[in-house]
Image (cartoon, coloured by chain):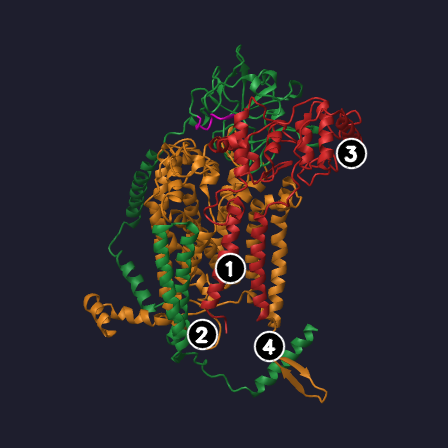
Chain colours: A orange, B green, C red
């Protein structure tokens, strides 16, 4: 069969050949750091595929049932249907545990990739006009992904996720004035909520948010297509062109390869490294708790903030205006996302630069932006470590109370130190032309004894 | 030392520049490499074949022995080999081309001006814009409210539900299996979790922790004298910070070389001093754990002597200190 | 060129070490002595002399304790003596230190003698447990109710303000029962009224099972939950996918 025949088939029915012509020759710049967003995209694909399999077996209901599956230590225990169906998925559905674990690893890696992608976009200045629109879509997807992940691991009604939901309830309640009503609305009453909560959480997780995410991803890709991807400076690369590989065949094959590589990594993890063993945690009851309970990594910054916050609550006229969880659970993430959203505007204001940019910066060429980004990341990361490192630090002899003071001080001090160190380093790298990892790659010029110059690469 | 290098670099650049030709158009980076690579093709074909074999292995294992690790390995290796073959094809087998495309100009002045004009023209002859605008605003507000209000049907009224607990004077304390808690069960340094007899244990106000401290060591707030017969103290088990179960009891065997008795929440380590009525001595909780007054029935059963001293669980707007 | 590769290799190695280090159990201690309170008078006498030389600086020559240093051990019983000595928690270097598991400071015969002496002063005998008669299902339930708040739901240990609840994988059945009945250091004390003999067997059976938890999902990474899971996501998957991206894409020219 000749190649012309399928092309003719499509053209006769859809008249799509002008579109296909442009698509086939569409040029993608090839730098490896432009693949980070694709890793996130392909993690999403794995999430949807594995998620569909899970929805066929999971039963989102808080109705109590007696577990009679094959996991002996819990046989005869009265648990919710959600928990029991998760146990069934893990023990009695073939490949059920593989798909469950792959799905959960995919969620963690989805967010790892988004954060790496965000860092690349920030430090190379890709958020500048005309791409600020896409940047806003991306930051929104980050927030939506965090919520989606939390909803997902809260569904099985195990001890860890139940404790997490209780904290989420407290955070919603802490919103001034409206918090109590909002929490009652979401949970259908006082925590642990009405029977309607679990099915609604399920619909949010498998329908409402995935549709929103898919729409945002579509918009994100459409904007890239329209504007064409940015690129680094280099031979023959100008602000008016795009240099790279054409979509067909090279780029499509490589990208498809990346899809299967992501799927491979996630499947290998799903089969070989255990994640969220709900049968070990046990089911949730409001009067039960475990030491060492943690949220999934992408919420670690919030548990750190909740732990570091001093016991401040604002009362006046017989009302609690600001309960304590508000500061760590609402104010802190609001500040972080506000800074993220406002950064393109802030940078425009400070630099006065309102031009269109399609060529990317090397981080070292923009010392102030790189330093600010590093400092901001350090701030969030310090609070994150405060929430996650309590056990490790106690093991090396630092009691918990001491840790709290160390990290409170560090959250203020470390970003300041990082800002100045990074800015100075960037300036030095930029001035001397040394590559941060490869070292000096230029020519070394020496004066010879006879008075001339001698150069060695 | 650095200045020396910079000076030398500047000299070199100046030196080079004297010999350089005047700047021309940017060099054309496009290229196309169609050399056949038979070895890469063979490797890719082999990888695809082995990937297929692992795929079959997955299918067989699924039916015969669905062990999670074996299934994950089989499918994972199949996907990895497929990925390898595709990347190899994309980087070595198909023509390697560097293409150059023009970047679209996003701003089109004429279209922009024409659009702006068309929009402006659409208002020709419309005389009372502000009146229409204000009326449209009223419609929007009204319809918007009409759309949002049904959300309130999704939840019950808050009212005083937040402060409701099943505890009243005379309600007996019971274990999870329903047996009554006796005062003598709660020995010194023991930790008991109890529930109101006949109530739903899952209700947030239900679970309490009961401990015993020597009467002489009690230092309760005013108006709570008599709440702790024989030194028995009962507090809501739901942390007033963020709602976790306070299941950690620090009960010193020898206080001079350790710390005082306290309830600790495992989530964010809010620490409550039991002798002072669960006052917060560390951590982010903003108010003490509510205390349940106790009395001992003639048959030694433990009973509540009233309702909780304050709102249970995490705080919100209407919670008083 | 090599610097970059070295850095990648270092990151991968460091990452794996960190995850393994988090999952690794603490160093093995010597097994406990299997002690019975001997009524042998010579054992008691030898125990007394050992007590005077090794314990009296904090617990007093008369075993009534020294204020601010150590409590009285009269009435502590064989159970307490055996627990503290066989887990190496006593002798304690500094009175204000938290007693932690360590290689026992005394030989088994010496521990037996010391236990005989303390037992002679009165107090609970070493509890007898029969883990094989324990029911795993009830043990799960009891552990979640009474123990998980400090020791973590799979017995991996936990922390509190002012104390560390140790991991339980090295505890023998007798030591578990002793700790439950004594409430050492700041651990609460559970008598037969809170945890009866059958429930204690159930608990011991469950705690012993946590040495080999059901890790059918693969590598358990310490059974600690989201922290090691997040480390794997970044240091294994993240690094692996970065390497894949580097292989597929180009570097700046």
- Which residue appears farthest toward the bottom when viewing the image? A450
Letter of the chain that mark 2 sits on in the rendering:
A
| Callouts 4 and 1 close, C-beta under 8 Å | no
Q: Is residue B190 left or right of residue A237?
A: right
Towards the viewer: A456 or B42: B42
Ranked by sequence position, the earlier of labels 2 and 4 is: 2
Residue topped by disc 4: A442
Letter of the chain that mark 1 sits on in the rendering:
C
Mark whose residue sits in front, 2 or 4:
4
Give the CA separation, mark 1 to mark 2.
32 Å
State the residue at coordinates (59%, 39%).
C167
Residue topped by disc 2: A238
Residue A249's place in the image compared with B244, above or below, is below
Give the CA separation, mark 2 to mark 4.
23 Å
Give the CA separation, mark 3 to mark 2.
81 Å
Give the CA separation, mark 4 to mark 1.
29 Å
Q: Position of residue A244 (x, y in %)?
A: 41, 72
Q: Are marks 4 and 3 on the same chain?
A: no
Mark whose residue sits in front, 4 or 3:
3
State the residue at coordinates (42%, 50%).
B68
Mark whose residue sits in front, 3 or 2:
3
Ranked by sequence position, the earlier of labels 3 and 1 is: 3
Residue topped by disc 3: C54
| Callouts 3 and 2 close, C-beta under 8 Å | no
Residue topped by disc 1: C239
Q: Which residues are magenta?
A: B201-209
Give the mark count.
Answer: 4
| Callouts 3 and 1 close, C-beta under 8 Å | no
**Secondary element type, mark 4:** loop
- Residue B202 shown in magenta: yes
**Secondary element type, mark 3:** helix
- Residue B49 shown in magenta: no
């Amino acid at each position: 069969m000749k190649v012309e025949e399928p092309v003719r088939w499509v053209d006769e029915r859809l008249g799509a050949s002008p579109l296909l012509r442009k698509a086939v020759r569409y040029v993608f710049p090839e730098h490896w750091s432009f693949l980070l967003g694709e890793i996130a995209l392909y993690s999403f694909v794995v999430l949807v595929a594995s998620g569909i399999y899970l929805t066929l077996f999971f039963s989102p209901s808080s109705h109590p049932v007696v577990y009679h599956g094959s996991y002996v230590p819990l046989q005869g225990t009265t648990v919710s249907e959600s928990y029991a169906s998760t146990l069934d998925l893990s023990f009695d559905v073939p490949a059920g545990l593989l798909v469950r674990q792959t799905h959960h690893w995919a969620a963690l890696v989805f967010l790892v990739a988004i954060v790496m992608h965000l860092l690349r976009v920030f430090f190379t200045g890709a958020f500048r006009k005309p791409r600020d629109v896409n940047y806003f879509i991306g930051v929104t997807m980050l927030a939506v992904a965090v919520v989606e992940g939390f909803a997902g691991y809260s569904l099985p009604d195990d001890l860890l996720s139940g404790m997490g939901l209780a904290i989420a309830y407290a955070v919603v309640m802490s919103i001034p004035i409206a918090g109590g009503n909002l929490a009652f609305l979401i949970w259908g009453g006082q925590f642990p909520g009405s029977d309607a909560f679990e099915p609604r959480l399920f619909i949010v997780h498998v329908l409402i948010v995935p549709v929103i995410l898919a729409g945002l991803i579509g918009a994100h890709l459409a904007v890239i297509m329209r504007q064409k991807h940015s690129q680094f400076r280099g031979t023959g690369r100008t602000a008016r062109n795009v240099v790279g590989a054409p979509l067909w065949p090279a780029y499509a094959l490589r990208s498809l390869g990346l899809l299967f590589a992501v799927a491979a990594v996630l499947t290998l993890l799903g089969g070989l490294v255990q994640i969220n063993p709900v049968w070990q945690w046990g089911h949730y009851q409001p009067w039960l708790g475990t030491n060492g309970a943690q949220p999934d990594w992408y919420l670690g910054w919030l548990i750190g903030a909740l732990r570091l916050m001093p016991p401040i609550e604002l009362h006046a006229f017989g009302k609690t205006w600001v309960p304590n969880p508000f500061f760590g659970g609402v104010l802190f993430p609001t500040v972080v996302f506000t800074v993220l959203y406002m950064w393109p505007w802030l940078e425009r204001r400070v630099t006065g630069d309102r031009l269109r940019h399609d060529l990317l910066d090397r981080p070292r060429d923009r010392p102030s932006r790189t330093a600010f980004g590093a400092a901001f990341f350090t701030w969030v990361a310090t609070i994150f470590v405060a929430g996650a490192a309590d056990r490790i630090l106690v093991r090396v002899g630092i009691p918990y109370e001491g840790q709290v003071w160390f990290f409170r001080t560090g959250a203020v001090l470390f970003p300041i130190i990082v800002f100045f160190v990074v800015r100075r380093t960037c300036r030095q790298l930029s001035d001397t032309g040394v590559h941060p990892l490869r070292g000096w790659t230029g020519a070394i010029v020496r004066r010879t004894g006879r008075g001339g110059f001698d150069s060695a690469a | 030392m650095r200045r020396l290098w910079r000076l030398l670099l500047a000299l070199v650049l100046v030196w080079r520049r004297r010999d350089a030709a005047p700047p021309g158009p940017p060099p054309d980076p496009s290229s196309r490499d169609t050399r056949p690579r038979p070895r890469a093709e063979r490797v890719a074909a082999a990888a695809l074949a082995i990937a297929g074999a692992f795929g079959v292995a997955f299918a067989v294992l699924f039916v015969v022995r669905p062990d999670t690790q074996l299934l994950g390995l089989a499918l994972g290796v199949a996907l990895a080999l497929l990925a390898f073959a595709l990347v190899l094809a994309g980087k070595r087998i198909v023509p390697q081309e560097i293409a150059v495309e023009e970047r679209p100009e996003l701003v089109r002045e004429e279209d922009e001006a024409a659009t702006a004009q068309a929009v402006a023209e659409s208002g020709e002859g419309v005389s009372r814009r502000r009146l229409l605008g204000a009326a449209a605003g009223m419609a929007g507000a009204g319809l918007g409210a009409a759309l949002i209000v049904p959300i309130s049907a999704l939840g019950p009224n808050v009212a005083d539900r937040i402060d409701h607990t099943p505890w009243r004077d005379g309600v007996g304390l019971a274990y999870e299996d329903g047996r009554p808690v006796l005062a003598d069960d709660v020995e010194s340094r023991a930790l008991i979790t109890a529930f109101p007899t006949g109530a739903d244990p899952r209700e947030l106000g239900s679970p309490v922790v009961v401990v015993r401290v020597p009467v002489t060591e009690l230092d309760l707030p005013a108006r709570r004298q008599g709440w702790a017969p024989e030194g028995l103290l009962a507090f809501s088990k739901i942390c007033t910070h963020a709602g976790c179960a306070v299941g950690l009891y620090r009960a010193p065997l020898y206080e001079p070389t350790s710390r005082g008795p306290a309830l600790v929440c495992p989530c964010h380590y809010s620490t409550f001093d039991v002798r002072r009525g669960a006052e917060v001595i560390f951590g982010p909780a903003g108010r003490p754990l509510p205390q349940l007054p106790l009395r001992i029935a003639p048959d030694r059963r433990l009973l509540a002597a009233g309702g909780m001293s304050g709102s249970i669980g995490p705080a919100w707007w209407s919670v008083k200190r | 060129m090599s610097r970059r590769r070295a850095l990648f290799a270092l990151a991968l190695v460091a990452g794996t070490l960190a995850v393994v280090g988090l999952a690794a159990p603490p160093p093995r201690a010597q097994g406990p002595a299997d002690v019975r309170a001997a009524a042998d008078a010579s054992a008691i006498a030898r125990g007394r002399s050992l007590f005077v030389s090794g314990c009296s600086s904090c617990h007093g020559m008369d075993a009534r304790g020294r204020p601010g240093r150590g409590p009285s051990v009269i009435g502590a019983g064989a159970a307490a003596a055996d627990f503290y000595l066989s887990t190496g928690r006593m002798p304690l270097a500094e009175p204000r230190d938290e007693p932690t598991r360590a290689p026992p400071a005394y030989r088994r015969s010496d521990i037996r003698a010391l236990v005989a002496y303390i037992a002679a002063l009165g107090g609970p005998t070493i509890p007898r447990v029969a883990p094989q008669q324990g029911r795993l299902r009830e043990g799960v339930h009891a552990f979640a109710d009474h123990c998980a708040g400090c020791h973590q739901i799979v017995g991996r240990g936990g922390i509190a303000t002012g104390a560390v609840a140790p991991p339980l994988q090295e505890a023998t059945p007798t030591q578990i029962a002793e700790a439950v009945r004594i409430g050492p250091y700041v651990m609460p004390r559970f008598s037969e009224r809170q945890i009866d003999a059958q429930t204690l067997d159930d608990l011991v059976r469950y705690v012993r099972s946590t040495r080999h938890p059901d890790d059918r999902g693969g590598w358990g990474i310490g059974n600690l939950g989201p922290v090691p899971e997040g480390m794997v996501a970044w240091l294994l998957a993240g690094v692996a996918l970065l390497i894949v991206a580097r292989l597929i894409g180009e570097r700046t020219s």
